[in-house]
Image (spheres, rainbow, N blue to C red):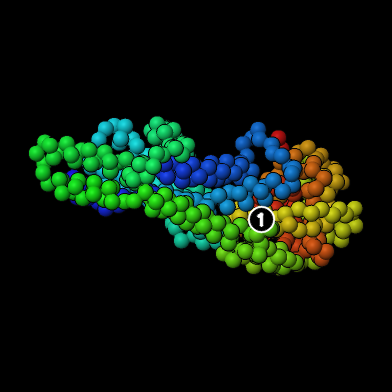
Amino acid sequence: MRRLMFEARAQLASPVRNPRMATVIGRLLGLAFLLCFGTGLYSHFLQQPLAWMTFPTRPARLYQFTQGTHIVAGIACFPLLLAKLYVVFPQLFQYPPVTSFKNFLERASIALFVGASLVEITIGLLNTYQWYPFPFPFKQVHFALAFVIIGSLIIHIGVKLPLIMAHWRAAPTPESDERHPVDTGVVATVTTAAVNTAEGLPRTRGVTGRLLRYIDSTPALPARTSRRGFLATVALGVAAVVGLTAGQTFAPLDALNVFGPRKKGVGQQGVPVNRTSAQAGVGSTALAADWVLTLMLGGTERSFSRAELLALPQTDVDLPISCVEGWSQMASWRGVRLRDLVETAGGSPTTDLRLISLEQRGGFKQTEMGHEYVSDPLTLVALELNGETLDLEHGYPARMIAPGRPGVLQTKWLSRIEAIDA
Ligand SMILES: Nc1nc2c(c(=O)[nH]1)N[C@H]1C(S)=C(S)[C@@H](COP(=O)(O)O)O[C@H]1N2
Ligand SMILES: [Mo]
């Protein structure tokens, strides 16, 4: 077994499979995961705030930026994680499988990290396409796995710290080192094998000889060239997957957006639609002639027809729809300032609100809005989009649009607005 594993590692030895490369790729992967974790937590708490939390409403495009970053960094993790697995692959054939408690911790945390990461980025990507072929709820699992990943990553980095520190900077390798393009694990194995041989385990001798011949025969230049080639391949992979999708949120890359699930400008009134009126089952109620928006604030109830809302002072704002799934779209909205409407209905713009849709089922038929959004002058009960009467698919007769919020909270087909009692 020892010999088999040793031979496997010898066969897999390559100039790019070394601790320096593992550190270089690992740093990028670590950065991508931290970006995902931070922006993910932000998105999570915007949707499920703790009681004491308030959020910045400006810059109005903040969430568009953080969530766009979340998706872009998550997509970049695919080539980075594959590259990292490629670099450290021979370590899989360590024998004996566990050598010490520290080694056990190291290997267990890596197994956890790799498994959790692959599931995390895969279900995350599938979520951007709204495809859920797995038998568990996306949101809860995606959230929980994030902590598994960060936890195992901390253990991994802790255990590997000496190695990471040693290879943080490119070593000013003497020319002769270029001729040892083998991972330190294999070098250690060579040493072990030599010792074994000395101890009378002659079966490994042939392998040792072959490996040493391999090391000796590998010329210096190809080693460096193949390392550059590998990094270039990884960079190209990242550029491709990011470049061909990031246009769904970052406008300058719009022309390159061929794989993003949404395309800017495609949809009713030039804005993509997430949940249609048919999916939400609001076709007839939203178009009913007797529709009114009812505000229930501080014990008094007041209702407004669409004509009455249109008769109130109208405000124009430019705000994006920024979907949690990573696409976003800037748009021009026209409607009644929420804080004015709240005051007209006898309420105060310093209270939190519950927004209730005509939608009967679905996770977002009802949402909550913190007072910081209620008092922001950019927050509208929107009646028009891009110069036309709001399309049914975008929330006719009236929808909420507020700065800095996830798309899921921009409630369409509004029916009721209530004060949440403190
Ligand atoms: N009532 C209701 N409003 C809703 C939703 C919903 O499912 N039901 N989806 C939200 C989501 S996830 C997004 S991204 C935005 C998209 O708005 P749009 O379809 O007008 O682009 O609407 C939000 N408003
Ligand atoms: Mo969304």
Can you see residue 336?
yes
On the rendered structure, is 167 left or right of 383? left
Decide: few, some or many residues near mark 1? Use Cα within 10 Å; few <14, some 14-19, many ≥20.
many
Can you see residue 152?
no
On the rendered structure, is 300 left or right of 250? right
Q: Position of residue 357 (x, y in %)?
A: 69, 56
Q: Amino acid at mark 1?
A: Phe
Q: Position of residue 371 (x, y in %)?
A: 74, 40
On the rendered structure, is 384 left or right of 40? right
Q: Residue at x 12, y 46 (%)?
A: 203
Residue 200's image quarter? Answer: top left
**Looking at the image, which residue sits at the far front?**
175
Q: Circle 1 is placed at which residue position? A: 250
Q: Position of residue 346 (x, y in %)?
A: 85, 43
Along the line of sight, the residue nearer the viewer: 34 or 422: 34
Q: Does dot 1 land on a helix, a strand or a loop?
A: loop
Residue 383's image quarter? Answer: bottom right
Along the line of sight, the residue nearer the viewer: 20 or 280: 20
Along the line of sight, the residue nearer the viewer: 255 or 198: 198
Q: Position of residue 177 (x, y in %)?
A: 36, 41
Q: Residue at x 28, y 43 (%)?
A: 186
Q: Residue at x 61, y 57 (%)?
A: 246
The C terminus appears in which quarter of the rendering?
Answer: top right
Q: Residue at x 79, y 58 (%)?
A: 332
